[in-house]
Amino acid sequence: MGHTWRDVRTMREVGRAPAAGPPADPADLVLTPVRASSSRAIWAAILAAAALIVLRSWVFLQYEQADFDADQAIVGLMAMHLAEGRAWPLFFYGQLYMMGVQAWMAALVFLTSPPTVFGLKLPLLILNVATGGLLVWLLVRDAGLRAWQAFVSALWFVALPPITASRMVQAQGGTIEPLLYALLLWMLRRRALAFGLLFAFGFLQREFTLFAAVAIVAVEAWTGELFTRRRLAHWLVVLLVFLGARQTVTLLRHTASMFGPDAAPPRLADGVTNVDLVAKSVCLSPGVMAGNVGWLAGHNVPTFFGVQAQPPGALILSGQPSGVPWAAWPLGLAWLTACGLVVRRGSRWLPPLRAPDDPRVLLPVMLVLTGILGLAGVATGCNIRSLFTIRYHLLLALAPVGLTALAFVLRGPSGTTSPSSSALPGGDRWMSVMSAAVVVWAAAMTWTHVQLLHEYRTSPPPSAYRVLADDLVAQGDRYGWASYWVSYHVDFLSRERVQLSPTSAIRISEYARQALKAGPRATVVGNEPCAAGDRTSRKVLDWWVCRRD
C-alpha cells in the first residue's frame, strides 16, 4: 500500500499543480501516510528509545568514577555557587565563551538535593531522552516514517556505545545540546525571530550549533527555495536577530562571575569569544586536513560507533576492554545498503534548484549534512588527532540516522515511494537487510552497556578521587595546592570542604587566595614524595599529601 500526502490548507496533492493560485509552501505540508502509525505505536517507539538512552547513560550518572574529571567538576562548582547565590556564571569559569547552560540546569537540581555527580548529569540525561524522543517524532511527522522505521533509524543515536554515550552526558559545557538544538532549529526554520534567538543561544553555548544552521540553509539552497525574495528576507531577519542576541549577551559579560565567587567582573575586552576560538583553532593546510581525515576515519569514527577495540580504562573507567570489532560488519552492511538504495534513485528524488516531489526527504538530508559537517569541522582543526576529540563531533550520530531514514523514504514497491519515482526491484528485501543490520549493531552496543552495568554492580572500579577527597576531609586539610586535574575534582567531591587550587589555569580565584593566605600551612597534593622538612607526609593511593606546618 502506498502513501499520499496532503496540504491541510489547500488539500492539494504534492507534486500536482493546482487549478489556480500559487504553489503550496513546503512549510504548510503535513505528511499524512494513508496507513500512518497510531499514536500508541509512536509512543511505544519513543518510550523504547527513552529506555535504551537511560540504560546507556546510567553507569555514568550513578557511578561518579566512571567518567568524571576536573572540567566537569568546574561545571558542578559553578552550579553550586549559583544555587547558593554566591556567583553568576554566565560562561564557563575562566573564559568568556561556552555559556554556562549546563551549570544553570544543575543549579535547579542542587536547590533541592546535595551536589553530586548524579545531580549534575541528571539534566543531561533528560536532554538525551528529549532528543531521542523528538528525533523519533520528527521522523514520523516530517519524514513520514512508520513508528518502527523511525525507531530503527534513531537507533544510531539511541544505542550509542559506552565511550560515546559517556560523552553525551558529560558536563563539559555543551555535549548533547547541539543535537537537540539541531532538531529544534529544523522545527523553527520558518520562524525567523525564534530561529535567530535559538541559534544565538545555541551558538553561544557551543559553536557546533552552527553546523545545523548551515545544513538547513544548504538544503534550501539546493532546492532553490533560498533564492526567493521571501526566504532571503527571512534569513536576513535571522542574521539580524542572531547578531543582536549575541551582542546583548556580550554586553552582559561585565556582570558575570568569570573566576567564581568574590572575583572582580571581567572587562568587555578581556578574554576571547567562541568566534575567536574557532578562528584560532582552524588549520586549513591541505596536508594537515588530509591527515586529520585519515585519523578520524581510522580511529575516531570506528570508536564513536563502537566497532574498534580499546584497552581497559580508555576514556572510561572499566576493567574490561571496550568496543565490538565484529559489529563493524552489520554497521558496514547497513550503511552500504542504505547508500545503495539512495544512489540507485539517482538525483530524481532531490533535483537541484527545484522543490522535491516528495518533501519527506528534506529532514533526512538535513540530518546527514549536519552530521557530516560536524565531523568535517573537526577535520579542519589543529591538534585533533586524539580520541578525546570525539566529544567535538557528537553531531556525527545524526548522519546515519538521516541516511537510514532516507532509505526508508525511498523504499521499495510495497512501501512508500516518491510520487515521481518508480519502485526499486527487491526494495523490500533490501529494506529488511538494512533494518536487520541496524538492529544487530544496536543489540551489540546495548549488550556492552549491560556488561558495563554488571561490572559496576558486582565489582565496581575504585573511585580514587573519592578516596583522596575523603582522606583530606578526615585529616582536616582545608586549603592547599594540587594539579588542575586533581584540585577541582576534589573540590567538587568534597563539596568545598577541601579547597585546592592549581598554580596555573586558575578557574576559581577564591581557592587560590585561601591557599596563599594559608602560607606554609597549605596542603600540597602531588605525585612526588614530600620534602624532608614537611611535618605532614602521607601517601594516599598514588598521591603524596604534604604540609610543612
Image (cartoon, rainbow, N blue to C red):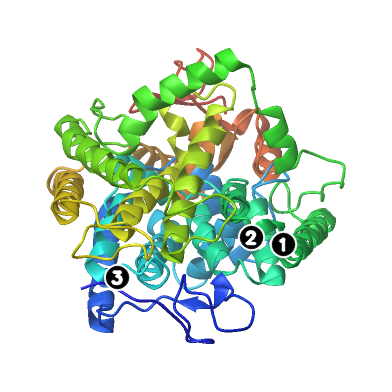
Q: Pointer 3: residues within 10 angstroms few (<14), some, or many (20+)?
A: many
Q: Which label belongs to residue 367?
A: none
Name the residue tied to disc 1. 228
The amino acid type found where label 3 is placed reads Ile
Q: Is residue 139 above or below residue 222?
A: below
Give the residue at x 71% y 40%: 513
Name the residue tied to disc 3. 46
**Element marked by disc 2:** helix
**Element marked by disc 1:** loop
Picture coordinates of residue 369, whole percent (x, y): 49, 46
Give the residue at x 40% y 60%: 128
Quadrant for the N terminus, please.
bottom left
Picture coordinates of residue 202, whole percent (x, y): 62, 56
Contact between marks 3 and 2 (CB within 8 A): the answer is: no
The amino acid type found where label 1 is placed reads Thr
3D distance between C-alphas at marks 1 and 2: 6 Å
Picture coordinates of residue 240, whole percent (x, y): 81, 60
Q: Looking at the image, which is closer to me, 535 or 391? A: 391
Q: Is residue 365 above or below residue 512?
A: below
Picture coordinates of residue 75, whole percent (x, y): 55, 50
Contact between marks 1 and 2 (CB within 8 A): the answer is: yes
**Element marked by disc 3:** helix
Q: Looking at the image, which is closer to me, 425 or 52? A: 425
Judge left or right: residue 263 versus residue 481: right
Work out whether residue 114 can be spotted.
Answer: no
Q: Is residue 147 above or below residue 461?
A: below
Between discs 3 and 2, the one toward the N terminus = 3
The amino acid type found where label 2 is placed reads Glu
Judge left or right: residue 87 versus residue 488: right
Q: Which label belongs to residue 225?
A: 2
- Closer to the eye: label 3 or 2: 2
Between discs 1 and 3, the one toward the N terminus = 3
